[in-house]
Amino acid sequence: MDVQQNKNWFLLRKVVIDITVLCFVGIPILLFFYIGSANERGFFCDDESLKYSFKNSTITSGVLYGVGYSLPIFIMCLTEFIRLRDYKGGEQRVILGLDIPAWVWESYRCVGVFLFGCACQQLTTDIAKYTIGRLRPHFFEVCNPSIDCSLPENQNRYIETFTCLGTNKNLLKQMRLSFPSGHSSFSVFTMVFLALYLQTRFTWKGSKLLRHIMQLIVIVMAWYTCLSRVSDNKHHWGDVLGGFVIGFFYAITIFAYLYKPLSLGTRYSALMESQALPRPIN
């Protein structure tokens, strides 16, 4: 087996290991979602923070994950294609007999790190949610606990033994998963990661402000998502803050230490200006 074949097998092994690691982190997330049971905390009858009305989410989970995954992946793949579509230098990459263009490999690297970061922040968020089991602001309306709070013996007493008269099983499970906010952690991670990516990889000769406008838009999207979780009575403000910290921490850490944009080295350094997105034709 020659040197080139060894390198090709190394690349294939790398891809297999990457997928295995991603599955290793993702499986616990699925277990939490399907069979996870949150810590059952009690409540005080006079806790006004749990007596808000139930509202539908302004940013639904479908919109959150649809945009959160598709937008960064689309922008990363498109950017790498435009920058590297004509790049012929460097080492030839072949996997299973297929030549891998530079832009495909770089897109794989970007997207792979991004998805790993998504899984890490989600697992961290889920561990906290199911361990703490904090009640959501709409707890009383969703649960309708079988406790007569007007009785003197229930005043100023921490009630742990009760039965929920509510019948929506999904809402009864979700009502104990207030801290930290999953919407906040996911939206902050994906949009901050994308903003960092744009800062290091997206250049356009037509306008230096385009990149910053795009960064502003994605950051505002994450900020609005965080605010909506409080206005929709889905979370306490501390839950949103906790989710924000988790998402921001993982975005900075994963991007800086795993993606390592500065490690591209001489392979693409010559492209930083010559392969920048072209100026529009007047």
Image (spheres, helix red, strand yellow):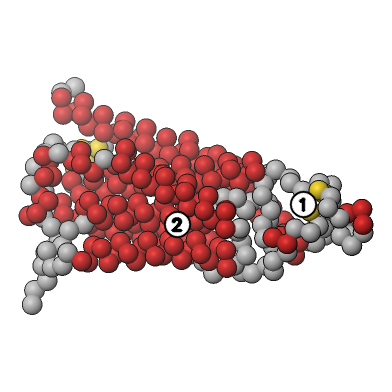
Residue depicted at 69% across the width and 53% down the height: 135
> Around disc 2, counting alpha carbons within 10 Å, would you say few (fewer than 14), some (14 to 19), or many (20 or more)?
many
SS of the residue under disc 1: strand
Q: Give residue 147's position: percent from left, percent from top.
A: 87, 57
Mark with earlier residue (2, 1): 1
- Figure quadrant of residue 126: top right
Tell me the kind of residue under disc 1.
Answer: Phe
Q: Nearer the viewer, residue 67 or 193?
A: 193
Tell me the kind of residue under disc 2.
Answer: Ser
Q: Give residue 99's position: percent from left, percent from top.
A: 19, 42
Between the residue at mark 2 and the residue at mark 1, the CA separation in whole angstroms equals 30 Å
Look at mark 1 in the image and give the residue it sits on: 43
Q: Where 137 falls versus 22 (above or below)?
A: below
SS of the residue under disc 2: helix
Q: Give residue 50's position: percent from left, percent from top.
A: 71, 60
Q: Where 235 falls versus 97 (above or below)?
A: below
- Residue 41 placement, left or right of 178: right
Q: Give residue 7's position: percent from left, percent from top.
A: 20, 29
- Residue 229 placement, left or right of 143: left
Q: Where 238 falls versus 96 (above or below)?
A: below
Q: Quadrant of the N terminus?
A: top left
Residue 242 - label: none
> Around disc 1, counting alpha carbons within 10 Å, would you say few (fewer than 14), some (14 to 19), or many (20 or more)?
some
Q: Nearer the viewer, residue 17 or 178?
A: 178
Look at mark 2 in the image and give the residue it sits on: 187
Question: In this rendering, which labeled residue sits more in front, label 2 or label 1?
Answer: 1
Residue depicted at 44% across the width and 62% down the height: 223
Residue depicted at 21% across the width and 52% down the height: 201
